[in-house]
Image (spheres, rainbow, N blue to C red):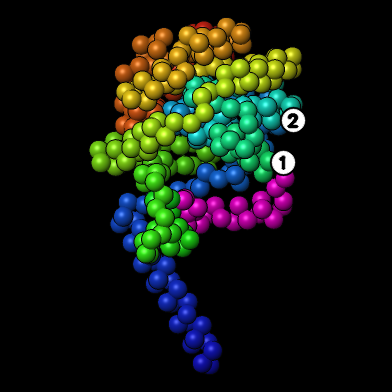
């Protein structure tokens, strides 16, 4: 009898504590969101092998992830693309994987963020290692890992505190302990980096409303971009990255595949740095000339300009909707995608 009462008390305490913990983080601006982890990416990658000639796959860096809205694309074309873009990453490992391990021969839209696209082919460099880890997870994942991911989805969609986020927005015990200042503990020199996105199960990403309305919050992200700019780093490796991509592109064309190159908007300090380290005439223009595919740069189309980028690099949510609509109009007018 006492065991039964103890169990009831334990369950009640757990429920009360969990509800209180959830309400606390909700009051601090956190919301339930699916973790954009390797497991979620692998689910979308698995769909590529079942796509038809008429389907579209999106790859690239975070701009493709933020700026192209999947439901809007489906609304305007009748088909929802597969979103495989990865933040802070080169698209080349993912393009290489699709070309060499999949039978897909539809359309791949490749987002070109020049400092990342032309960054490196070195396997251990961050822009390459991150997407490669996702590719490897897709090919090596076990049934137990797949099941664990599926079981976690209802919880992720319901509770803000169930999150794998790291850094300043990390809510796991390990992350919270790491933020406690004790003695002379070494402090990460990088400014706090907030996760300013909300992710859906199909990996569609939208910018948090707070980025539009809270200038202080947006400035924290700008400070991180400036930290990276000022920290320097190796120069872009245009020669190796160009050769790597063009080799895979030729294979994909031989399979009957179609590629679209897209340069999404950037602004202010970010655009100035990009112009300095990856000038358009020596990187984008050369890539387009050698690739021989349809290519779209935001600077060439008035309807793809004058958007609001709260931190210089990604579109706010409603502008991402408009950008997607206008891009689709351009692609249809150019007969780059079907016009149903």
The quarter in which the C terminus is drawn is top right
Q: Is residue 213 visible?
A: no
Nearer-the-camera pick, 333 or 179? 179
Per the rendering, the mark at residue 101 is 2
Residue at image x 47%, y 77%?
11
- Give the labeled residue for mark 1: 139
Label 1 crowd (10 A; few <14 / some 14-19 / many >=20): few
* Mark 1 and mark 2: Cα distance apart in space: 10 Å
**Highlighted range, magenta:** 140-166
**In the image, residue 26 lies at what x, y percent?**
34, 56
Q: Is residue 291 left or right of residue 230?
A: right
Above or below, 211 relative to 164: above
Nearer-the-camera pick, 322 or 297? 297
Residue at image x 74%, y 30%?
101
Secondary structure under badge 2?
helix
Residue at image x 37%, y 25%?
270
**In the image, residue 149 lies at what x, y percent?**
60, 52
Q: Quadrant of residue 55?
A: top right
Q: Main secondary structure of the magenta part?
A: helix
């Amino acid at each position: 009898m006492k065991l039964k009462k103890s169990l009831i008390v334990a369950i009640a305490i757990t429920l009360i504590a969990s509800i209180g913990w959830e309400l606390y983080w909700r009051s601090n601006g956190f919301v339930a969101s699916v973790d954009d982890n390797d497991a979620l990416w692998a689910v979308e990658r698995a769909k590529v092998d079942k796509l038809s000639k008429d389907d579209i796959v999106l790859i690239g860096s975070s701009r493709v992830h933020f700026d192209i809205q999947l439901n809007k694309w489906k609304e305007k074309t009748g088909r929802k693309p597969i979103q495989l873009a990865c933040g802070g990453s080169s698209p080349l490992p993912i393009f290489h994987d699709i070309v060499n391990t999949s039978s897909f021969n539809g359309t791949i839209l490749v987002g070109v963020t020049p400092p990342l696209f032309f960054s490196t082919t070195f396997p251990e460099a961050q822009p390459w290692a991150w997407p490669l880890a996702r590719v490897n997870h897709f090919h090596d994942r076990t049934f137990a890992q797949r099941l664990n991911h599926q079981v976690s989805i209802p919880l992720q969609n319901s509770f803000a505190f169930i999150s794998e986020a790291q850094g300043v927005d990390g809510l796991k015990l390990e992350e919270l302990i790491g933020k406690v200042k004790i003695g002379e503990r070494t402090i990460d020199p990088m400014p706090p980096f907030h996760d300013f996105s909300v992710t859906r199960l199909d990996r569609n990403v939208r910018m948090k409303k707070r980025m539009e309305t809270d200038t202080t919050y947006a400035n924290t992200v700008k400070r991180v971009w400036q930290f990276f700019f000022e920290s320097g780093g190796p120069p872009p490796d245009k020669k190796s990255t160009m050769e790597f991509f063009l080799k895979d592109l030729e294979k994909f064309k031989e399979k009957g595949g179609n590629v679209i190159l897209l340069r999404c908007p950037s602004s202010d300090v970010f655009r100035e740095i990009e112009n300095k380290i990856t000038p358009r005439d020596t990187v984008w223009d050369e890539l387009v000339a050698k690739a021989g595919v349809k290519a779209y740069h935001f600077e060439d189309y008035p309807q793809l300009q004058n958007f609001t980028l709260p931190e210089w690099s990604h579109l706010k949510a409603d502008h991402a909707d408009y950008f997607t609509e206008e891009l689709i109009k351009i692609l249809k007018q150019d007969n780059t995608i079907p016009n149903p």
